[in-house]
Image (cartoon, grey):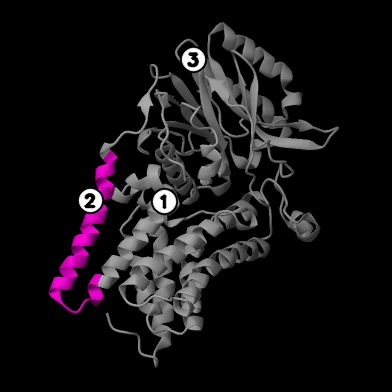
């Protein structure tokens, strides 16, 4: 590939922006996963022989395109449901995108400024290592936002089989190592050298694919009978006081036919849109009915104390016993306000119900449902493999509850489901995922969707996850 002439820098700048804008096509719902390997080739091309400053600019432009088209749905949640003025919502969304774009900008600067190695080693070692390091930093810095980590795009590719061994960041590294191999192959001067690099690329992919034949977890006991209830309660009415009785009636009417047919019935995040203390009578009656019919309910519900001003985004299980799980990893600005003294103005522009939660104890006992210990995660927590992994190896299956109604018919619910699939594959556990408006699903231990519900319809999914034992992933 030819070096971009110094007299035409805008060609490289535009190429970086356009290639980044195409990157979301590698993720759900499009899932053109080869693009996650091919589009970074353009980055290597526009970085070749560029100054560190120009490389940073082009990395930033790539990030603006990628996150601009990849997380645009933040505007929907702020404007359509947070009641923020369009200008404020657009500005807030742009600032998040801009911060995210700083990471590939930093990769570009470091790659061209401190790329100590030269030739193939620079493309095969420095480039994948820098990108992966910065993705990992993005997963925890300022509370973390690892959305659109490159590895998620490979859930359906042979590289996805690396998940139990290396986790999502290791998969991303393998994808960029493949990019480096392609770049090296294209730049090789002889046919023999090109064939050698192509052979190495083939060996990497064949090795990853072969790992799919290895099962590191095994079933323990018979499959559970699990019903996933999707209430489809519109976000615009969900928290209206007069809507509570109708909401509870809908969930109960969808669930009662499964009594005697299911071991566990799962309702989504905040399916009960009222504090636990305010609906104790309802939950006691539901629990009594559940014990009679030998079924466990698992539902999202806010909990807390007005006296102590301590509130949690929680999951409660009622039936054989009553247990709670309190969300540990909260969504900044959505569930709590970081640096409140500085960002207090945010509350003056955006209305978000239940936005003053505190994180739950990191060492919480596991819920039991269907007679099995289960690893529970709530919405945003599914993005953090470290959070899900805390329930292993004791948990024999996983439950994720979410409310993606905040994002309407955007790409966000599809991306969220893809992330949940990666968690199931990493942990080697089946995951039952209950959402308010979709996409509810049962995901097997290979990250494959066994049962999937429609979006924006009230429905009940009958599923049969198999409890599993064993552990490989340590990442």
Mark-to-mark CA distance, 3 and 1? 37 Å
Nearer-the-camera pick, 367 or 98: 367
What residue is at 22 percent from the left and 66 percent from the top? 197
Element marked by disc 1? helix
Q: Where, by quadrant of the figure, is residue 123 drawn?
A: bottom left
Name the spot of residue 212 as percent of width and height, x first: 28, 40
Are there few (<14), some (14-19), or many (20+) residues within 10 Å of tag 3?
A: few
* Comparing labels 3 and 1, the label whose residue is closer to the camera: 1
| Horizontal side of residue 90 vs 148, given as left or right | right
Which residue occupies the extreme front position in the image?
A: 116
Closer to the chain start, of discs 3 and 1, is: 1
**Which of the marked residues, 1 or 2, is nearer the chain's N terminus?**
1
- Residue 193 drawn in magenta: yes
Q: Which mark is residue 206?
A: 2
State the CA–CA distance, disc 1 to disc 2: 19 Å
Q: Residue at x 50, y 78 (%)?
A: 57
Q: Earlier in the sequence, mark 2 or mark 3?
A: 2
Rendered residue at 73%/20% (across/down) = 280
Residue position for label 3: 257
Nearer the viewer's eye, disc 1 or disc 2? 2
> What element does badge 2 sit on?
helix
Disc 3 on helix, strand or loop? helix
Q: 10 Å neighbourhood of mark 2: few (<14), some, or many (≥20)?
A: few
Q: Position of residue 231 (x, y in %)?
A: 54, 30
Residue furthest to the top in view is 292
Tag 1 residue: 152
**Which image quadrant: the N terminus?**
bottom left
């Amino acid at each position: 590939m030819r070096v971009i002439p110094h007299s035409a820098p805008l060609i490289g700048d535009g190429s970086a922006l356009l290639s980044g804008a195409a990157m979301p096509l590698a993720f759900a719902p499009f899932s053109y996963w080869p693009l996650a390997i091919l589009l970074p080739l353009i980055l290597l091309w526009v970085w070749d022989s560029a100054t560190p400053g120009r490389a940073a600019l082009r990395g930033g432009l790539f990030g603006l395109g990628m996150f601009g088209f990849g997380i645009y749905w933040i505007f929907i949640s702020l404007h359509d449901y947070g009641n923020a003025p369009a200008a404020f919502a657009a500005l807030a969304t742009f600032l998040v995108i801009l911060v995210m774009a700083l990471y590939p900008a930093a990769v570009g600067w470091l790659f061209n400024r401190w790329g100590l190695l030269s030739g193939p080693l620079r493309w095969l070692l420095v480039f994948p290592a820098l990108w992966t390091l910065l993705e990992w930093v993005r997963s925890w810095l300022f509370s973390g936002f690892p959305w659109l980590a490159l590895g998620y795009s490979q859930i359906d590719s042979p590289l996805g089989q690396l998940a139990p061994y290396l986790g999502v960041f290791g998969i991303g590294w393998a994808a960029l190592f493949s990019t480096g191999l392609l770049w090296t192959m294209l730049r090789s001067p002889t046919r023999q050298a090109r064939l050698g690099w192509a052979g190495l690329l083939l060996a990497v992919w064949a090795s990853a694919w072969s790992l799919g034949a290895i099962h590191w977890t095994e079933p323990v006991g018979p499959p559970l009978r699990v019903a996933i209830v999707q209430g489809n309660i519109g976000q615009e009415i969900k928290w209206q006081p007069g809507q509570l009785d109708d909401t509870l009636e809908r969930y109960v009417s969808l669930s009662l036919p499964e009594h005697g047919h299911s071991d566990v019935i799962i309702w989504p995040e905040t399916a009960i849109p009222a504090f636990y203390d305010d609906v104790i009578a309802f939950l006691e009656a539901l629990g009594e009915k559940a014990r009679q019919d030998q079924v466990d309910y698992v539902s999202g519900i806010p909990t807390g104390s007005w006296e102590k001003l301590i509130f949690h985004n929680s999951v409660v299980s009622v039936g054989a016993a009553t247990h709670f799980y309190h969300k540990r990893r909260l969504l900044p600005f959505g569930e709590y306000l970081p640096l409140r003294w500085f960002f207090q103005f945010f509350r003056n522009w955006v209305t978000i119900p239940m936005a003053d939660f505190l994180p739950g104890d990191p060492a919480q006992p596991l819920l039991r449902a269907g007679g099995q210990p289960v690893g529970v995660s709530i919405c945003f927590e599914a993005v953090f493999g470290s959070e899900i992994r805390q329930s292993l190896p004791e948990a024999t299956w996983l439950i994720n509850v979410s409310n993606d109604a905040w994002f309407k018919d955007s790409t966000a619910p599809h991306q969220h489901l893809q992330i949940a699939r990666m968690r199931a594959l990493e942990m080697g556990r089946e995951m039952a995922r209950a959402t308010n408006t979709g996409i509810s699903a049962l995901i097997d231990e290979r990250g494959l969707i066994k049962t999937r519900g429609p979006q924006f319809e009230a429905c009940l999914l009958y599923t049969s996850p198999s409890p599993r034992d064993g552990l490989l992933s340590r990442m």
